[in-house]
Image (cartoon, rainbow, N blue to C red):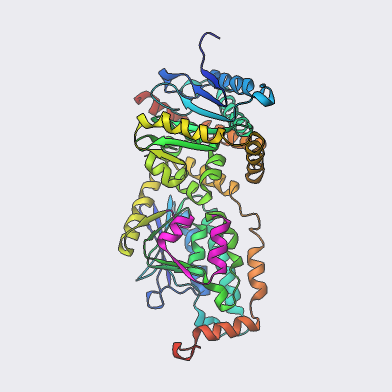
């Protein structure tokens, strides 16, 4: 399993466990993630804690797999799996705390859009530089726009650069900032344990209301927009360029 | 009315609405909200050219507002929805005033009181004031105030605040965006609020009202149906056996 899930008391922990690839997402991982959320809730988790093993939370889609599949089916599975993973977090009756330590990039950054509390560190690298590889971030754009407002969404999705944990805190994509990456998981666990003590009926009603009040206006159309670009020549070309050995880059 | 549960003072271009139930730390009760509505009615009835331009909202005594007076309504049939709907209506009505409203938060704004703060256009408090939304800790749902917090701080931070419960100080409220201006101590508060009100009142009457009305349209502030639907959600959670049992225990301890 490259996504582990376990119940620690009342806290259901989901761990991206592919540290040797900086937790780069595969279609299977996203399926395991979604199944893990369902299983933990069925087993009575009162809070979900999402984390990544190793040095960073998540570096995004595994692009090597995408390049190996020029027809685009892998990219399509990743986009569909990501959309589902974000939605199951958002629709879970429990709060979701996400520990984004070190880096949360592209698809990894998109995961933030489904969480209720995101903890990150000052110097973490966060961002959504997917236009660089010819991919549209539309799949999660509605969620991240709802999270931090339209201005942050524009600058983060149109500029293929990265921001820091502090920058993401200022724009509202991160709600809790700690000094270093090693502080992230302890703080996120502390928050998760605290939320688990609250009366579950009040938490569930409050989360459902917030979902209702902040439903992305175009929530349904994001995935279709991302899928529409997949498998095109621009994506193939830019992916190949991004994955080429650095010294061959112009 | 023998007691004046809310007072309105008009001083030229600046009006002040003060919640006046200091013995209950200005907890929002049905009679008090009725008086607050009546005071807004007086303001609304003023001739267009005599209208104040700014309205300071504050609380007499030891708190701005300690929240909903749930203790008073918990065991009275039909009272919780009436109280919550009255607050929902009040917040929308307050928001629709042409005056620019300034919440002057003295000492404490909890739950519904913190929601009232967010429904104002601007807010000022002192660094060691106490604010927050501890509803979930009490087993209730802060639905009636949620739309105002979402408008004030955005959905991401609103999630963090409402799902976490608890309270925080004025400085933290400022970081979160609930408070626009923070002064060091309570002694500085009156002067700071007066300065803001004066600055606002130096603006053009028509320009201020038109700008506020536009901002209200853009963020859906006038949505009375939504406000009432949220009041119903708060009331539904409050009607649950487990919520009532929890609150009864809390009130017995207090």
What residue range appears in magenta? A149-175
Q: Is B14 covered by the magenta stretch? A: no
* x then y, percent, for residue B251: 39, 25
Work out whether B24 lies above or below A244.
above
* x then y, percent, for residue B232: 60, 33
**Residue A249 visible at all:** yes
Work out whether A47 lies above or below B195.
below
Query: Residue at (63%, 77%) from the top-left corner?
Result: A230
| Quadrant assignment for the N terminus of chain A | bottom left
Q: Would residue A183 appear left or right of B139 to someone viewing this image?
A: left
Q: Would residue A174 appear left or right of A187 to someone viewing this image?
A: right
* x then y, percent, for residue A30: 51, 69
Q: Give the camera-side residue of B24 and B13.
A: B13
* x then y, percent, for residue A215: 61, 52
Query: Residue at (58%, 49%) from the top-left corner?
Result: A214
Query: Residue at (61%, 19%) from the top-left corner?
Result: B38
Q: Give the camera-side residue of B60 and A82.
A: B60
Occupied quadrant, residue B98: top right
**Residue B139 visible at all:** no
Q: Is A167 covered by the magenta stretch? A: yes
Query: Residue at (53%, 49%) from the top-left corner?
Result: B155
- In this figure, what is the number of numbered marks? 0
């Amino acid at each position: 399993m490259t996504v582990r899930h376990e119940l620690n008391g009342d806290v259901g922990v989901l761990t991206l466990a592919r540290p040797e690839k900086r937790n780069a997402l595969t279609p299977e991982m996203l399926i395991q993630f979604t199944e893990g959320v369902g299983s933990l809730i069925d087993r009575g988790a009162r809070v979900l804690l999402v984390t990544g093993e190793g040095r960073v939370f998540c570096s995004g889609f595994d692009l090597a797999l995408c390049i190996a599949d020029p027809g685009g089916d892998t990219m399509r599975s990743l986009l569909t799996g990501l959309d589902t993973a974000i939605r199951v977090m958002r629709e879970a009756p429990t709060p979701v705390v996400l520990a984004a330590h070190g880096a949360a990039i592209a698809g990894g950054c998109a995961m933030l859009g489904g969480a209720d509390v995101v903890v990150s560190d000052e110097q973490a690298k966060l961002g959504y530089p997917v236009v660089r590889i010819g991919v549209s971030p539309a799949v999660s754009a509605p969620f991240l726009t709802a999270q931090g407002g339209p201005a942050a969404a524009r600058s983060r999705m149109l500029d293929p650069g990265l921001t820091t944990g502090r920058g993401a805190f200022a724009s509202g994509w991160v709600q809790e900032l700690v000094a270093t990456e090693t502080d992230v998981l302890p703080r996120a666990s502390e928050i998760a344990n605290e939320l688990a003590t609250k009366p579950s009926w009040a938490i569930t009603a409050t989360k459902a209301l917030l979902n209702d009040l902040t439903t992305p206006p175009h929530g349904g159309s994001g995935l279709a927009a991302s899928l529409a670009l997949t498998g095109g020549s621009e994506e193939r070309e830019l992916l190949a360029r991004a994955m080429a050995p650095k010294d061959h880059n112009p | 009315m023998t007691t004046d549960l809310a007072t309105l003072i008009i001083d030229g271009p600046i009006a002040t609405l003060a919640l006046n139930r200091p013995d209950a730390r200005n907890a929002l009760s049905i009679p008090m909200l009725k008086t607050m509505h009546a005071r807004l009615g007086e303001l609304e009835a003023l001739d267009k050219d005599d209208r104040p331009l700014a309205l300071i909202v504050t609380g007499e005594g030891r708190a701005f507002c300690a929240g909903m007076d749930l203790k008073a309504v918990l065991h009275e049939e039909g009272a919780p929805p009436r109280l919550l709907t009255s607050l929902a209506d009040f917040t929308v009505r307050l928001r629709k005033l042409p005056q620019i409203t300034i919440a002057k938060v003295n000492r404490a704004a909890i739950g519904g009181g913190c929601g009232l703060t967010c429904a104002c256009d601007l807010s000022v408090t002192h660094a060691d004031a106490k604010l927050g939304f501890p509803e979930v800790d009490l087993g209730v749902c802060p639905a009636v105030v949620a739309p105002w917090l979402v408008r004030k701080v955005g959905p991401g931070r609103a999630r963090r605040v409402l799902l976490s419960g608890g309270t925080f100080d004025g400085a933290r409220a400022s970081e979160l965006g609930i408070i626009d201006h923070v002064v060091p101590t309570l002694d500085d508060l009156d002067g700071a609020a007066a300065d803001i009100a004066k600055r606002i009142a130096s603006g053009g009457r028509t320009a201020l009202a038109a700008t506020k009305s536009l901002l209200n349209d853009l963020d859906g502030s006038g949505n009375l149906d939504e406000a009432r639907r949220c009041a119903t959600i708060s009331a539904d959670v409050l009607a649950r056996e487990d919520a009532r049992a929890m609150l009864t225990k809390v009130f017995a301890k207090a």
